Amino acid sequence: MIKNEFEKLIKKYDKKIVIDKIVDGKYNTVNNYGTILHRHVFYQIVWIAKGSGAHMIEGQNYEYSDGTIFLLAPYYLHKISYDKNVQGYVISFCDSLLDRFQNKSTLLFHNIDKAYIEVPNKEVELLNDEFNLLNHYSITNTSISQSIVQDYLHIILTKINGFKSLKEKDSVQAQTNDTKILEQFVLLVRQHYTEEKQLHFYTSQLAISQKKLNQIVRNATGHTPAKFLETYILNEAARILRYSDLSVKQTVAELGYSDSSYFIKAFKKQFKKTPTEYRKSAKLNLNTK
């Protein structure tokens, strides 16, 4: 019964894309002209077509201007401020939405050192057109609109990947091999996180040493594989608490934890609230910033 409810929850929210348009520095946030310090339970693209402001991500401060992209993974602690001239978009979505693209696109978000991208001047207007079309079809109620929205999101992510590649300085071959391993690791985590919480399982499946896996994951995400796995699970827990009526005890069981006290301690460390406190404070929709 719990499994069926969980599957319905995932089906309902994982295919959803929430698009917020920034107009004159305002959109649907807790505070005008910016957000409070917070973490997400979903992936997010912040597109600044025009304007300036400041964005703090995991303690690192960025001053941004026209043609800036920020890529935010679910666990990033951040806050952003917008000057009154800012125009752009904030796109929010869950990773399983991109299964049709083999989940590779979400790997763009897992490198904290590359969360900030300056788009070439000649590409700014063209990219903004893609965001405008994404927004247009998201509010068009037709039988194919959802598919079109997903296609435009994929186009945008493909372009972003191209912008990032222009600045890469590492060996292409080494980068390709490490990326493949990272892709496989993330996919394994998504498929097995409820029953496999020991790194030995993942290194065995990937046929690499724990030292090598640690090097690849840390270089790309800033976290060890163990921390990445725990963070992924805790964000799944936050999503269940936010969007379902499962009790904390049921959530713990669904995620494969045998020790409730350990889970509650880890959750509080990540979100600064107990699971019960988090549920009470969270709004039950993806528009929460």
Image (cartoon, rainbow, N blue to C red):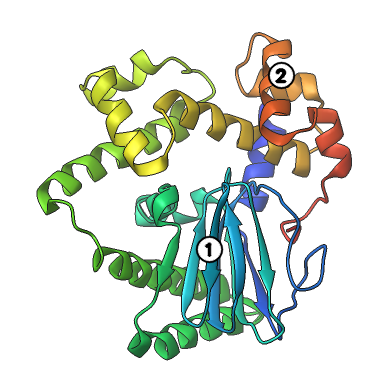
In this orientation, does residue 15 appear? no
| Residue toward you, 260 or 256 | 260
Give x and y (percent) for residue 140.
64, 82
- The residue that disc 1 covers is 62
Residue 117 left/right relative to 25: left
Q: Determine the image quadrant of residue 165.
A: bottom left
> Of the residues under marks 2 and 1, which one precedes in the sequence?
1
Residue 253 occupies quadrant: top right
Give how far across and how far down residue 90 sits, in percent: 61, 69
In what element is the residue under mark 1?
A: strand
Give the residue pinned by disc 2. Answer: 265
List x then y, in percent, for residue 230: 54, 26
Is disc 1 surrounded by few (<14), some (14 to 19) or many (20+) residues within 10 Å? some
Residue visible at 28% across and 69% down in the picture: 162
Classify the position of the N terminus by image quarter: top right
199 displayed left or right of 87: left
Residue 207's tag is none
Of the two numbered discs 2 and 1 in the rendering, the one whose residue sits closer to the viewer = 1
Tell me the kind of residue under disc 2.
Answer: Lys
Please determine whether, in this image, residue 93 is positioned above or below residue 198: below
Residue reaching furthest to the top: 259
Q: Quadrant of residue 241?
A: top right
Disc 2 is placed on an element classified as helix
Residue visible at 35% across and 43% down in the picture:
220
In the rendered image of this protein, does residue 223 appear above or below residue 261? Answer: below
Nearer the observer, 253 or 182: 182
Would you place residue 198 above or below residue 231 in this image? above
Q: Disc count in the image?
A: 2
Cα–Cα gap, marks 2 and 1: 32 Å
